[in-house]
């Protein structure tokens, strides 16, 4: 079966976006560094068009910054970003947990159980714990069944994820914080939206306090 050019380009653009986002979030591309399109074309073995489409998408998500007549740069990380991001997440994340308690399906809760089981089965370092935390949050966004809310939260979670990677070497054991998702899961499965929202709000607040203390050192 032949694949038309537009479909192929979109596929390459998505691949470029996912690879570049991973490089930025993991800090392989450092905050404030210049984004060299020629290097990316060679590194990703892709042409200019999919890479430029991916970079435009990343700039819309505030992971990259376009500076007229100077080029494109990886977005910086700062305390102000953390504070503003936390303000948003403290409102939207509890809303998602509340809606998930109302609309989520048993299939969502099984997925969360599987993710959380990894905390018991494998000795987890902070990197592994971050992956489990991410998986749980994204399941909750899906369970909330509100595309506008999930789009916003997925974007802003990724920004928060970059802060985790920035501070991971100085963080305490994250296992107790990630384990809070079990209490969230129990509340959502029971249909208790208020309890799920309260647990989520406390979870986000602790994340903000932990990262802020590291950035202020």
Image (cartoon, grey):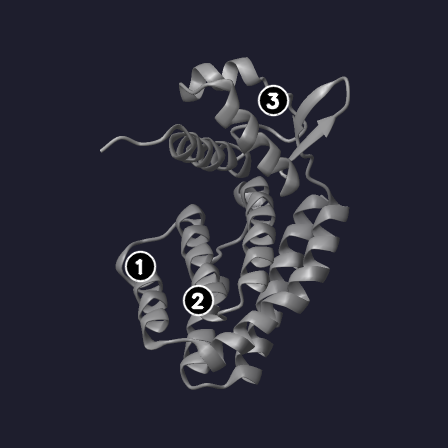
Q: From the viewer's perspective, is the residue at label 2 or at label 3 nearer? A: 3
**136 or 3: nearer the viewer:** 3
Q: Are marks 1 and 3 in contact (CB under 8 Å)?
A: no
First along the sequence among labels 1 and 3: 3
Numbered circle sitting on residue 49: none
First along the sequence among labels 2 and 3: 3
Residue for badge 3: 35
**Relative to 40, is 131 on the left or the right?**
left
Mark 1: few, some, or many residues within 10 Å (few <14, many ≥20)?
some
First along the sequence among labels 1 and 2: 1
How far apart marks 1 and 2 lie (CA) works out to 11 Å
Residue for badge 1: 118
Judging from the image, what secondary structure is the residue with disc 1 in? helix
Judging from the image, what secondary structure is the residue with disc 3 in? loop
Residue for badge 2: 179
**164 or 95: nearer the viewer:** 95
- Residue 3 placed where, x, y %? 31, 32
How far apart marks 2 and 3 lie (CA) works out to 37 Å
What residue is rendered at 60% in x and 72% in y?
94
- Residue 211 placed where, x, y %? 64, 51
Judging from the image, what secondary structure is the residue with disc 2 in? helix
Quadrant of residue 122 within the rendered picture:
bottom left
Residue 151 sits above or below residue 3 on the image: below
Q: Are marks 2 and 3 in contact (CB under 8 Å)?
A: no
Residue 191 sits above or below residue 169 on the image: below
């Amino acid at each position: 079966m032949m694949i038309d050019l537009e479909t192929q380009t979109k596929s390459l653009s998505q691949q470029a976006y996912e690879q570049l986002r991973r490089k930025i979030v993991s800090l392989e591309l450092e905050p404030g560094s210049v984004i060299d399109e020629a290097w990316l074309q060679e590194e990703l073995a892709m042409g200019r068009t999919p890479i430029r489409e991916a970079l435009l998408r990343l700039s819309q998500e505030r992971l990259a910054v376009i500076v007229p007549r100077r080029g494109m740069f990886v977005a910086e990380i700062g305390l102000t970003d953390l504070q503003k991001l936390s303000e948003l997440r403290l409102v939207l994340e509890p809303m998602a947990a509340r809606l998930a308690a109302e609309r989520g399906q048993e299939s969502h809760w099984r997925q969360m159980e599987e993710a959380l089981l990894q905390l018991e089965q494998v000795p987890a370092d902070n990197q592994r714990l971050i992956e489990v935390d991410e998986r749980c949050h994204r399941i909750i966004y899906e369970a909330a069944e509100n595309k506008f809310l999930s789009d916003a939260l997925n974007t802003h979670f990724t920004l928060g994820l970059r802060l985790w990677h920035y501070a991971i070497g100085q963080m305490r054991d994250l296992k107790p914080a990630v384990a809070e998702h079990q209490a969230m899961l129990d509340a959502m499965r029971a249909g208790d939206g208020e309890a799920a929202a309260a647990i989520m709000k406390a979870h986000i607040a602790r994340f903000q306090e932990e990262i802020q203390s590291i950035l202020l050192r």
